[in-house]
Amino acid sequence: MSLLCFITDDKRGSSGKAATSPAENYHLARRRTLQVVVSALLTECGFESAEKAAVETLTEMMQSYITEIGRCAKAYCEHTARSVPTLADTVVTLIEMGFNADTLPVYAKRSQRMVITAPPVTNAPVTPKALSAGQKRIHPAYIPSHFPEFPDPHTYIKTPTFREPVSDYQVVREKAASQKRDVERALTRFMAKTGETQSLFKDDITAFPLIAAQPSSIPYLSALLPSELELQTLEETDSSEQDDQTDSENAAGNLINDDPGGDKENSMLPPSSVVPSAKASEDNVIDNPYLRPVKKPKVRRKK
């Protein structure tokens, strides 16, 4: 009995140390249960006390023996295409490990055995509500009961989302305004950190930095210059006009070359008939895009 009291006191002393995870709690509870079983067996054998190192060694030996039995029984079970070991698997495992299974009933009915109270059963973990979807399916009649169960429904069915998108006009406008404000603030801070800044206070330059204004000698020049979109549109219009002019010149040259019966004087056009028109068209082009005549955009017809 003194050995059981020693183990109980050691259990109470070690319980003061809080485990950090459920796995460690389970390991400690299993270890303490094995220590109580080993102490009971030693008491049945006539021992009154034992050192802690001896009890730990015996506990480790018993744990290794039970673990090996479970591993071998699981291997025999899986070898026969089952998932849950049966009594036959355990008996075969004990015989394989060299234990006489016929002595177990006699040992279980011994008169000096000590009854140990069962450890408290912990409640099964509750499935979070966020993962609960649908009802768990059971095996149909044509599937044996020893087969694994179906997984949780949220792993293979569509989980509905209960958060509806915000469609209120006021909330959407407030969110858009807040995002715009955040973007402007972030851009201002970035420009203040990467460029020149001016401060409102001479003592502390880092407080309330302002983006330094860059004065221009011609402030109205930016308003007169065309934007990139306008320049791109003008370039496309000019390129299309040049293509049309080139096509018309090529067509005229082909007509002249295709007239074999004409006179040489009529067939050979003087260079003055083409070059002056090109020069005249170049002279008519005005460099300033705002002073050019209005041109209608070319509409390309689908063929």
Image (cartoon, rainbow, N blue to C red):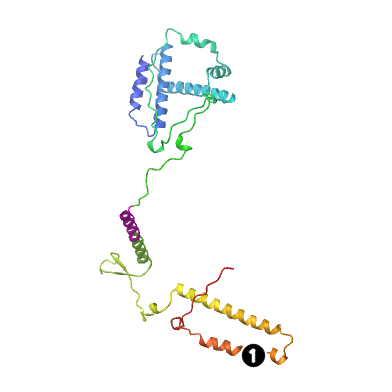
Left or right: where 117 falls relative to 201: right
Q: Indicate the position of residue 3 as horizontal and vertical percent values.
A: 37, 17
Marks counted in the figure total 1
Left or right of 264 in this view: 221? left
Q: Nearer the viewer, residue 297 or 126?
A: 297
Which is more toward the observer, 197 or 178?
178
185 falls in the magenta region: no
- Locate residue 255 relative to residue 40 in the image: left or right: right
**Quadrant of the rendering where the C terminus is positioned:** bottom right
Q: In the rendered image of this protein, does residue 111 appear above or below residue 132?
A: above
Image-quadrant location for residue 222: bottom left
**Residue 32 position within the rendered picture, expressed as x and y whole percent measured from the top left:** 40, 23
User: Mark 1 is on which residue type?
Assistant: Pro
Q: Residue at x 50, y 24 (%)?
A: 67
Q: Residue furthest top?
A: 111
Q: Quadrant of the N terminus?
A: top left
The extreme right residue here reads 261
> Between residues 281 and 260, which one lies in front from this camera angle?
260
How far across and how far down the image is residue 140, in percent?
51, 27
Q: Quadrant of residue 261?
A: bottom right
The residue under the point 64% across, 80% down is 251
- Which class describes the residues within 10 Å of circle 1: few (<14), some (14-19), or many (20+)? few
Queried whether the magenta region covers residue 171, the answer comes back as yes
In this rendering, the answer to whether 36 lies above or below 108 is below
Say which residue label 1 marks.
271
Which secondary structure lies at badge 1?
helix
Image: 262 above or below 95: below
- Range of residues picked out in magenta: 168-181
Residue 250 location (% of width, % of height) = 64, 81
Majority secondary structure in the magenta region? helix
Q: Nearer the viewer, residue 81 or 55?
A: 81
